[in-house]
Amino acid sequence: MTFLWRRRKCGRGGKRDKAIKPINSKKELTIPTHFRCPISLDLMKDPVSLSTGITYDRESIEKWIDAGNVTCPVTKQTLRNFDLIPNHALRKMIQEWCVDNKSYGVERIPTPRVPISPYEVSEICTRMLAATKNGDAKNCGELVKKIKNSAKESERNRRCIVSNGVGSGLADMFETFACFSADKHVGLLKEILSALTWSFPLGEEGVSRLKSTVSLRCMTWFMNGEDLFAKQNAIFVLKDMIYEDQSCLDGLAQIEGIEEALFHIVKVPICPKATQACLVIIHRMMLLQEKGSIITLRFVQMGIIPLILDILVEGNKGICERL
């Protein structure tokens, strides 16, 4: 496969155009075949080898495996394992090739970060448990930030972190420091809520921590606060909790001020997703067997019906405008 690159042109002040676009040119630049991923046919950024000895770009082969495939795309052999071994030698050759062809607008591929391993996640969980038990807010904050930074690096990291039980540890930490003092540990609690939004499913133990009266009161407190980011995260966590375990609705219905908090967020929206999450929670609360009718009456008296009608009308207007 041959790709054509335009040489970078100097603009004002000698600055080069960062855009790299393949166009027709007299000079052609051919990517060596062994530098291209057999799946995407693109230049590999993070070459990794399977047990069959064939090398692929990490992103492409991970998608292949995540789709349920158990064979090597090239050899069709059944994989003995799903280990992805970094091909450092090939990566360095690709990086050198990029440097050598810099004049054609080819940018050097950065050295990829090593993905987090299940062992590392397990170690972090153990440290979280110890720090939480000791009430070490500073260490807990550092561990939560470390988890969030790792998750931001790649989707693979995020999946690895979630599948190895970090959510349960975060839930335990949230309940513990909410019990100590929400005002004193507000910064840490906000960080935990932010991480919890992408840590579901939490498992039985994790959900039991978050559906405690202490945790639910703390989330309601955030929902009634001024910090829009924390308010939004509390809503998302509550919605995901309900999807994982509907029994938390009984405890939520007991929390003072929850109806007012949900109604206000629908009335003064933060974002469409937060409004949708609020409406889901309200709907589920209205369906409760024992208190559903009472909760429904409260929301009706607050004026939820006109708000929902306004949302529907605005939604229809948006559809009409797009058409």
Image (cartoon, rainbow, N blue to C red):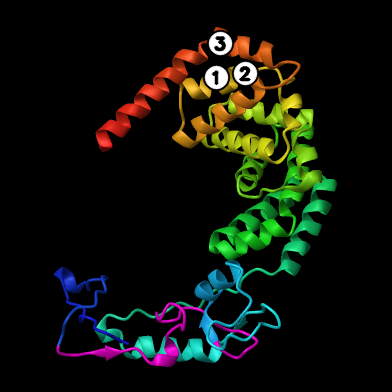
Pointer 3 or 2: first along the chain:
2
The residue that mark 3 highlights is 300
| Vertical position of residue 1 compared to residue 223: above or below | below
Q: Is residue 112 above or below residue 210?
A: below
Q: Residue furthest top?
A: 301
**Numbered range of the magenta stretch:** 26-54
N-terminal label among 1 and 3: 1
Check residue 259 in the rendering and tell me which mark sits there, or answer none.
Answer: 2
Kindly report the distance in space between the C-alpha atoms of the residues bearing marks 1 and 3.
10 Å
- Camera-nearest residue between 130 and 43: 43
Please say if the residues under marks 2 and 1 sit with CB atoms less than 8 Å apart. yes
Q: State the residue in front, 188 or 63.
A: 63
x and y, in percent, of residue 135 in the image: 81, 44
As helix, strand or loop, the secondary structure at mark 2 comes to helix
Q: Please state if 45 lies on the left or on the right of 16 as rendered.
A: right
Q: Which mark is residue 263?
A: 1
Give the residue drawn at x 56%, y 10%. 300
Measure the alpha-carbon separation of dots 2 and 1. Answer: 6 Å
Alpha carbon distance from label 3 to label 2: 11 Å
Residue drawn where x is 25% and y is 85% of the image = 103
Q: Which mark is residue 97?
A: none
Residue 130 vs residue 75: left or right?
A: right
Instruction: Tell me if mark 2 has few (under 14), some (14-19) or many (20+) residues whose alpha carbon lies within 10 angstroms of its own.
Output: many
Residue 14 as seen in the image, left or right of residue 54: left
Residue 181 in view:
no
Which amino acid, by three-letter code, is at mark 2? Glu
**x, y (%) of residue 196?**
65, 45
Within 10 Å of disc 1 (Cα), the crowding (few <14, some 14-19, many 20+) is many
